[in-house]
């Protein structure tokens, strides 16, 4: 059950509470017990729906944390590769083919290409 279901169950429970509050003294004991039982069912539905929603939110939070971790790792790897290429270029050396490939590969994976990181043509 989702939030909409929880809200519907809560609205139903509140309606029953209002009816019980406005109860006519002529209401039979059986009718009163039936309304209270209905109230318990509605409140149990609300509790279950909120527990389900809580679990879904925790799962989403874990997924977000994992994606942030992956992104940070990929960015750190990218910075390391680019720094290695820049050091090589400052020394007058040609960057190794492997370093060019790893940076170009990362650019292909993200779908973004940055200057100096394209795959070498062979």
Image: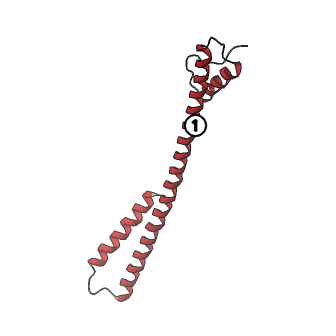
Q: Which residue is farthest front?
A: 91
> In the rendered view, does 14 fall on the left or right side of 102?
left
Q: Which of 91 and 111 lies nearest the eye of the viewer?
A: 91
Q: Which of 65 and 98 lies nearest the eye of the viewer?
A: 98
> In the rendered view, does 103 fall on the left or right side of 9?
right
Residue pictured at 69% horizontal, 18% vertical: 96
> In the rendered view, does 32 fall on the left or right side of 102?
left
- Residue 82 picture quarter: top right
- Residue 100 picture quarter: top right
Classed neighbour count for the residue bearing mark 1: other residues with Cα under 10 Å, few (<14), some (14–19), many (≥20): few
- Is residue 68 something one can see in this rendering? yes
Q: Indicate whether 56 appears above or below 100.
A: below
Q: In which quarter of the image is the C terminus?
A: top right
Q: Indicate whether 115 appears above or below 2.
A: above
Q: Which of 58 and 97 lies nearest the eye of the viewer?
A: 97
Q: Which residue is farthest right?
A: 122
The kind of secondary structure element at disc 1 is helix
x and y percentages locating residue 89 in the rendered image? 60, 14
Residue pictured at 66% horizontal, 17% vertical: 95
x and y percentages locating residue 72 in the rendered image? 54, 37
- Is residue 117 something one can see in this rendering? no
Residue pictured at 58% horizontal, 39% vertical: 70
x and y percentages locating residue 77 in the rendered image? 60, 31
Residue pictured at 59% horizontal, 28% vertical: 80
Q: Mark 1 points at which residue?
A: 73
Q: How is the image coloured?
A: secondary structure
x and y percentages locating residue 117 in the rendered image? 60, 19
């Amino acid at each position: 059950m989702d939030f909409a279901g929880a809200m519907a169950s809560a609205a139903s429970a509140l309606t029953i509470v209002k009816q019980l509050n406005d109860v006519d003294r002529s209401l039979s004991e059986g009718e009163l017990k039936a309304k209270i039982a209905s109230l318990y069912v509605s409140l149990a539905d609300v509790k279950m729906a909120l527990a389900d929603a809580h679990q879904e939110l925790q799962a989403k939070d874990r997924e977000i944390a994992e994606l942030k971790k992956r992104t940070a790792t990929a960015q750190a790897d990218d910075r390391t590769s680019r720094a290695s290429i820049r050091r090589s270029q400052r020394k007058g050396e040609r960057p190794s083919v492997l370093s060019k490939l790893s940076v170009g590969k990362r650019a292909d994976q993200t779908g973004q290409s940055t200057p100096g990181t394209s795959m070498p043509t062979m």
